[in-house]
Amino acid sequence: MLYVYLKDEKTIELIDGKKLIISPSKHEILLEPFKDSEHSAQEFVAEISQNPLLRQFLFLKNVITMSLDNTSKATVNYPFCFEPYTDLATRLTSSDHEFKIKKLEEKINLKINEFGDLINSYYRIIFKIQLHSTALNKAQEGDSFLDIMQKSAESDPKIAEQIQSIFIDSFKSWQHLSELYRFLDHINIVEAAIKNSLSINQTMPLPEKSQQILDALSVLSKHFFIKTISMCIDCYFVYNDYPPFVSTTSSVRNMNLNNGCPRCGKKGLVHRISWDYLESITKLIMPYSSWLYEIIIGNAIANLDFVKDVYIHKKIHFCVNEKRLDPVESDVTIVTKDNSLLLAEVTTQSDDSNITSAISKKCEYMKKTQIPYEKLMYFTSSESSEYRDMETFRARIFGLKHLYKLDDFVNAFVLQKSQN
Ligand SMILES: [Zn+2]
């Protein structure tokens, strides 16, 4: 049984008469949507956790942007490229490419100045309107700036022409500026796109299996509106062709899988795949919180044969002589059918030294609280192709590669126990 949301605390009888208390976390209310298996958030997570490729994909490097006008909406962006062994990232650090990036930045500065000049023109018009007594006489209390401009333009056709021309120029200038920003932003995701591609390549050889990635992402289309934007880095860096080839889609099915750029023919296409999360999920992916990923791993583990119950993000206390010891915050608490306790920690951290130090700290603390765990699994976004054991802590660190065949890796680690 999977418990994502827990209303009241529960006492668990473990093997050898040991007792464990599981209590709701401070922010349990955020998990409430997951008590209902038909809630859209739970349906989405169940789908991801049972799909090996999606499970792995979600742990890839991504950028989350919060909507400025709607804090309940988060957009997640995954940089990706279907050519894992491209030399794009190395080339971007060459002096020739760095010079071209500098030129782009200079263009942006020029455009910003141009925009500043347009703003000055607006001020000049406002000044003219102020001198234009007819317009001011016609202005009424509550009129907006545009209303006053409109009234002024009606009384003087020359002002109307000037306003129109400034509007057109500023629109063009703004478009150009946002195009430049968009391209620079795309250059900045190249490194992450290649790392993500190499991670997926460990289980799904690319570009041969690209279609499988699209098929997996199409499953997500049931839950979200998936947008993609693809740009060719080589158009500009190899052929000085600006703006480069750009293709956007509002359905992942229509995404351009052709690795060769239709314009320059080089394999410089880098993609950004993004979607908006539901409000109930947005709350779980605030900075420093990886609750969504904990729920995905918990769902996947709950289906394994040896598992009885799984609890997500709870406080657990060991009970000795009816006295509860200090609690530990546990990402995924697993009670097996033979009443042993297994724990899993979940992070999207990929830096191996940070991962090792976090797990050491956690385990040292758990020693003090005497939590009687048999084994600890640490699920991470590490790019390392081998899992790592930390024998002193009975712990195993898994990386991105292991999320694909998670069932096999978890079974093998847990079975080791009965072999000992
Ligand atoms: Zn191109």
Image (cartoon, rainbow, N blue to C red):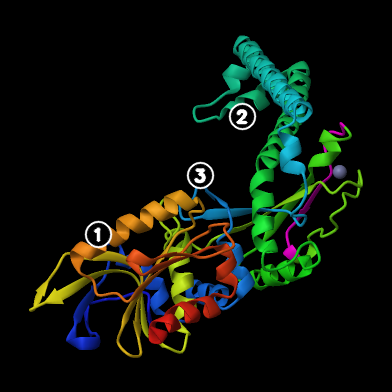
> Mark 1 vs mark 2: which is more N-terminal?
2
Which amino acid type is shown beneath numbered disc 2?
Asp
71 or 362: nearer the eye? 362
Looking at the rendered structure, which numbered label has been put on residue 365? 1
The magenta span reads 240-252
Where is residue 47 shown, x and y percent of the image? 57, 76
Task: Please name which of the two marks, 2 or 3, marks the residue nearer to the observer.
Answer: 3
Image quadrant occupied by the C terminus: bottom left
Q: Residues within 10 Å of mark 3 (few under 14, many from 20)?
A: few
Side (left or right) of 373 relative to 206:
left
Which amino acid type is shown beneath numbered disc 3?
Leu
The residue shown at (62%, 29%) is: 146
Q: CA distance from mark 2 to mark 3?
A: 27 Å
The residue shown at (68%, 57%) is: 198
Q: Judging from the image, what secondary structure is the residue with disc 1 in? A: helix
Question: How would you classify the magenta stretch by its main secondary structure?
Answer: loop
Q: Which residue is mark 3?
A: 68
Where is residue 278 shown, x and y percent of the image? 51, 63
Pick out the residue farthest to the front: 420
Q: Which residue is mark 2?
A: 147
